[in-house]
Image: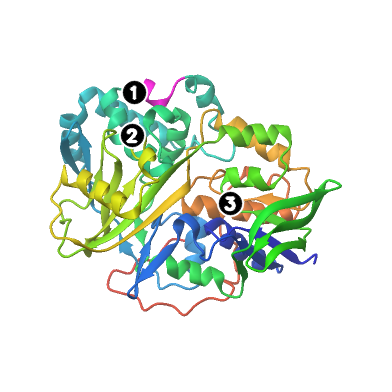
Amino acid sequence: MDDVVYIIGAGIAGLGAAHFVRQQGRIPVVLEATDTVGGRAGAIEHDGVSYEIGGKNFASDWKLFNGILRGFHSLSFDRQHPNFHIVLDGKVYGFDKRSTLTNGLGMMRAIGLRSVLQFNALLRRAGRPGAPVRYYDGSSAALERRYDGRPLSAHVPAGLARGPLRMFTIIMGAAEPDEFSYATLMMLLSSFGKGSHHSLPETTAHLFAHLSQGVEIRRRHEVRRVVLEAGGVKALEGRSPAGAFSIDARAVIVATPLHRLAQIVALPPGAQWAASRIPYHPLALINADYETDVFTPEMNSIMFDPDSPLGHCSANRMHKRHSVRFTLAGRRARPLLTQDDASLLAIAEDAFRRVHPLPGKAVFAHVRRHGDGLCAYGFGYSDSRRSLLAGLKPIQGLAVAGDYLYGHNMEGCLQSAMAATRHLSGAEGAYDRSYDYPDGADPAGAAAAVPAGADALRSPA
């Protein structure tokens, strides 16, 4: 039993933790409450075609994500959208990611010169060499002390908040600018524009199939309590289709959203306080295929304004312009998420038609509600993170991984998974640094490589 690490949750953090546990020579056992793996970065299949139900893009400078890919993938990827559009006051403004001059002029028309200058100043400040603002080392604390008395929207012109900055708060936290911290924005912007951005042609399903190889995953095993005794983990209790279960356990990684951690572990008061301060906002993602192309090479990604229930909408892939990803997120969307699937699709289509034609009818639609939401990190995040980890540190055999520690994207979740495995191994300060993929690591059950296409990209080491 000393060699077994039980991992609660089969999302990217949980299966990433299983991958790193295997590299340490220990045995991972994953307990997943649902029938599926992947969580908010997973995929579904319809008529032999896979669709991501959440995150799909990754960056070429993600160290752990690309390290895992090198173990099984040809490194031939789909490129991200070359342009994006923002809706402001009912008007649609387009921006080409490759044209600085055009974007500058377009943004001036959309939000005004003052907002453009402030936006550029934010990007310069966030990307300043030698002074990055990061989740894991308290580098945001000074910004939090200075700015967190008021939300992001109070520190920038209204047009800038409703337009370009809302693109970050919605995509990265399903939150409005008046719900978001200035310091959190700076953490997001610190990595903006670094590396190139891509998607897996086979979707994230290919990644999770690789991470699942050789790993015991007990599906429909809902852990309801991590039993603690004498300052350490003793057992896991929960329910499965066979009934109630109790598993002796001495090493556990909880890889769930933070509010689920608070439900199954008796957190010390300081950690409980911290967990209550880090917010999550729900959203729904709809994959819909249409009879004809919806998007064009000139318009393939749209960021909507705060008056719309749609937060963001894009082509599934550049070569699949008939395949649409609607994201219902933000304040206007939240009260609607309990409606049935057909109603949510109709709401999304109606909002989309207000800014762009929607030719033909949907021939396939799949709605996935993410009730656990996206982590928006909150105000005073560095204090919350520090208090949470300090409260959990004395509990022997317990580690945590998830979107609230290093960012909610797939790389952030993998970084938290690596930190969790190092913490269980006794490493001091495991959560206070970032990680490279281990040199010479066995990829552990690597799948056969996919033949490289014409647009192959060699990811950096």
Asked if residue 177 can be seen in this view, the reply is yes
**Picture coordinates of residue 123, whole percent (x, y):** 36, 34
Q: Which is nearer the eye, 450 or 309?
A: 309
Report the coloring of the rendering.
Answer: rainbow
Q: Which is nearer the eye, 440 or 72?
A: 72
Give the residue number, with chain letter if any, for mark 2: 165
**Which mark is nearer the camera, 3 or 2?**
3
Is 342 situated left or right of 63 in this image?
left
Range drawn in magenta:
150-155
Q: Earlier in the sequence, mark 1 or mark 3?
A: 1
**Residue drawn 44% across and 78% down?**
449
The answer to the question of whether label 2 and label 1 lie on touching residues, with beta carbons closer than 8 A, is yes
**Residue drawn 49% across and 34% down?**
131
Q: Marks 1/3: CA distance?
A: 34 Å
Give the residue number, with chain letter if any, for mark 1: 156
Secondary structure state at the residue bearing disc 2? helix
Question: Is residue 388 rendered magenta in the image?
Answer: no
Secondary structure state at the residue bearing disc 3? loop
Is 237 situated left or right of 36 in this image?
right
Q: Quadrant of the N terminus?
A: bottom right
**Vertical relation: 173 (above or below) 425:** above
Give the residue number, with chain letter if any, for mark 3: 256
The local crowd at label 2, few if under 14, some if 14 to 19, many if 20 or more residues have their Cα within 10 Å, is: some
| Numbered mark located on residue 198 in the image | none
Residue type pointed to by label 1: Val
Residue type pointed to by label 3: Thr
**Picture coordinates of residue 20, whole percent (x, y):** 62, 63
